[in-house]
Each structure stands twice: as C-alpha cells, then as structure tokens.
Image (tube, rainbow, N blue to C red):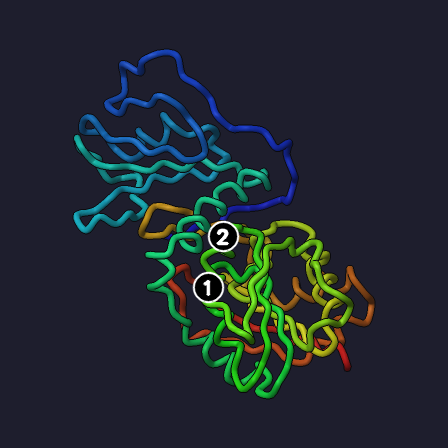
C-alpha cells in the first residue's frame, strides 16, 4: 500500500490534466472514456493489472497505481501480476510527482472525504502517539493555543484541557463547518490560510501543527513556520513523519476508500535546514524531539514531534 518516489519540488503550471480520448480502444477490455490523475472504471473483461496501468498511465515517470475493490467493499493497491475480471471496480491513479497543483488536488479529494463528511469524522479518534504527546507537552493551565490544519477538529478539543482556550484553523470550508458543531466557550474554529495567519503577534502561548500537515504543502514550509512563530509567544509544536530515514522522497498513503494522500517526509536534519532558512539561530531553539516508533499508523513511517522553544 505504500510507495516512495523522487520529488524534485518543481512547480508546474496549474492546468487541468484531462486528456479526452476520441476513439474506442479495441485492444482493451476496459473501456476508458477519459484520462485524468484519478479514474474510476469498471472492468469489462479479463485483463492484467499491468496491461490496464500501461494503457491508462499518462507517463511512465508518474506515480501510477491501480486500486481494486475487494469483497468487503474496500480498495487496496493491486500488484502488477494480478488479474482483473469483468465487473471489478477499479480506481486508477496517474499522478505527476513534480506538479504541486496536481498533488494538492489529490489531497483535496482525500481531505474532503475524511475531514469534510460527518459520517466519516464521527469514527475518528486520537492516535496513541497523539494522546501521549498531548498529555506530556500541552500546557495544563489557562494557556491559549492555536492548531493549524485542524481539519474537522479531530484533535483540537483534546487541547482544551484544564482551562486552555483553543483556536483551530483550516483552509477547508467544509472541514471548518463540520468542526464548528463542537465549539464551546473555550474552543473556536476559523477558516484561514496557514501562509497568512489572521492573528496578532504573539496572540497565542503555544501553536501546534499535527499529522505531518507541514508535509502536505510540498514547498515553502519555512513560511508556515515563520507565521506560527509570529503569532506565538512561547512554543511551536510540530508533528512530523519520517519514512525509511529519508527526506528526499514523496510518500503516499492509499486509503481503504480509494483516495490517496501525498506528503513529503521529514528527518531532524531536514527540519533543521528549514529552520536555518528562517534564522541562523533558530535551530538552537529545538527544545526536544520525541519519536514514537512503537505506535505505527496505517500509512507507515515513524511519528516524531519537535518542540521549538521561542524563549530559549
């Protein structure tokens, strides 16, 4: 279910990646009417996964994978040596890893499903590493906190412990609408851009960014950290993901519902290099880095949390 591919960070023009096919593929058992980075099709005859991928991929250099629905109604990534039979429900991805706009479009589909739908959100709980980190590192007494990229507010209410006042921010209007169903006198959700935070200087004691959300932007991560530092007086807490100790790869997770989430992965070294872009002495303000390798997530990798002490 997991794959890593090189990512050079090049930004392509934001265009619609749709290629209309005006002819019938007589040699294929799967009828393809259009080609985009995500296609949903029904197989009309016996054919190998390799053949289908080869006939639908937009480029061999792209991230090309085929998801097949199983008897339980869940999607999984099919191997190239597998066969697809008539009636199989398939989702095919052919994604340009060098196109930031295309990667973000895939993530928007993922986020709309997992963070914008109430029936899905109701099943979401804290992961064990999140629970431990909140217990150990989130202040306990009347502090003001900001969580950016909060989604539907899955984590945000847990930050309101012992009198803390918390603001959750996200760029998805659907997610914020859903999150606002759980507001209280100590918990507020706002729509906003992490690159231009709508808050005053040092308005919050602590700011947090969980779930490797820093990795879904693919570029200019230092700008987001700069924004967090500006609106925070004490500490910035970053939840990040490391895969195979590599910071040179783009990682993706295939969900059981047939969506793919892309993110760049982090190491301490990569985080330090981002901080150095902001300020020469900012790296020295890393108070601690805590790893949780024994608490895996479905999409793999090791979770780690970096605490940036602004008063150091």
Disc 2 versus disc 1: distance between alpha carbons? 10 Å
Q: Which mark is residue 301?
A: 1
Residue drawn at the location 65% of the way across and 40% of the way down: 10
Q: Which mark is residue 197?
A: none
Q: Which residue is mark 2?
A: 251
The vertical placement of 90 against 19, above or below, is below
**Hey, which quadrant is residue 265 in on the image?**
bottom right
In-image side of 269 versus 71 (left or right): right
Between 158 and 34, the one nearer to me in the picture: 158
In-image side of 225 versus 170 (left or right): right
**Hey, which quadrant is residue 14 in on the image?**
top right
Give coordinates of residue 78: x percent, y percent: 29, 43
- Secondary structure beneath label 1: loop
Give coordinates of residue 189: x percent, y percent: 56, 63
Between 188 and 104, the one nearer to me in the picture: 188
Find out whether the residues at labels 2 and 1 contact each other: C-beta distance under 8 Å.
Answer: yes
In-image side of 174 versus 14 (left or right): left
Between 237 and 97, the one nearer to me in the picture: 237
N-terminal label among 2 and 1: 2
């Amino acid at each position: 279910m997991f794959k890593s591919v090189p990512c050079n960070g090049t930004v392509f023009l934001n265009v619609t990646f749709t290629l209309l096919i005006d002819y019938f593929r007589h040699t294929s058992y799967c009828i393809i009417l259009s080609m985009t980075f995500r296609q949903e099709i029904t197989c009309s005859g016996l054919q190998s996964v390799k053949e289908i991928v080869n006939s639908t991929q937009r480029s061999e250099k792209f991230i090309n994978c085929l998801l097949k629905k199983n008897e339980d109604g869940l999607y999984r990534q099919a191997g190239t040596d597998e066969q697809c039979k008539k009636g199989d429900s398939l989702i095919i991805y052919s994604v340009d890893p060098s196109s930031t706009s295309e990667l973000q479009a895939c993530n928007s589909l993922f986020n709309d499903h997992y963070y914008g739908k109430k029936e899905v959100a109701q099943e979401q709980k804290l992961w064990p590493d999140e629970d431990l980190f909140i217990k150990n590192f989130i202040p306990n007494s009347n502090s003001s906190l900001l969580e950016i990229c909060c989604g539907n507010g899955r984590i945000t209410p847990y930050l309101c412990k012992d009198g803390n006042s918390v603001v959750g921010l996200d760029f998805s209007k659907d997610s914020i609408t859903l999150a606002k169903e759980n507001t209280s006198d100590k918990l507020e959700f706002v729509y906003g851009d992490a690159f231009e935070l709508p808050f005053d200087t040092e308005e919050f004691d602590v700011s947090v960014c969980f779930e490797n959300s820093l990795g879904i932007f693919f570029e200019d991560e230092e700008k987001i950290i700069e924004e967090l530092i500006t609106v925070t007086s004490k500490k910035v807490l970053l939840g990040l993901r490391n895969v195979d100790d590599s910071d040179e790869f783009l990682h993706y997770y295939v969900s059981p519902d047939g969506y793919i989430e892309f993110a760049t992965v982090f190491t301490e070294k990569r985080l330090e290099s981002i901080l150095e872009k902001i300020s020469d002495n900012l790296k020295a303000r890393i108070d601690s880095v805590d790893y949780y390798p024994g608490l895996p997530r479905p999409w793999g990798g090791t979770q780690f949390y970096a605490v940036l002490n602004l008063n150091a």
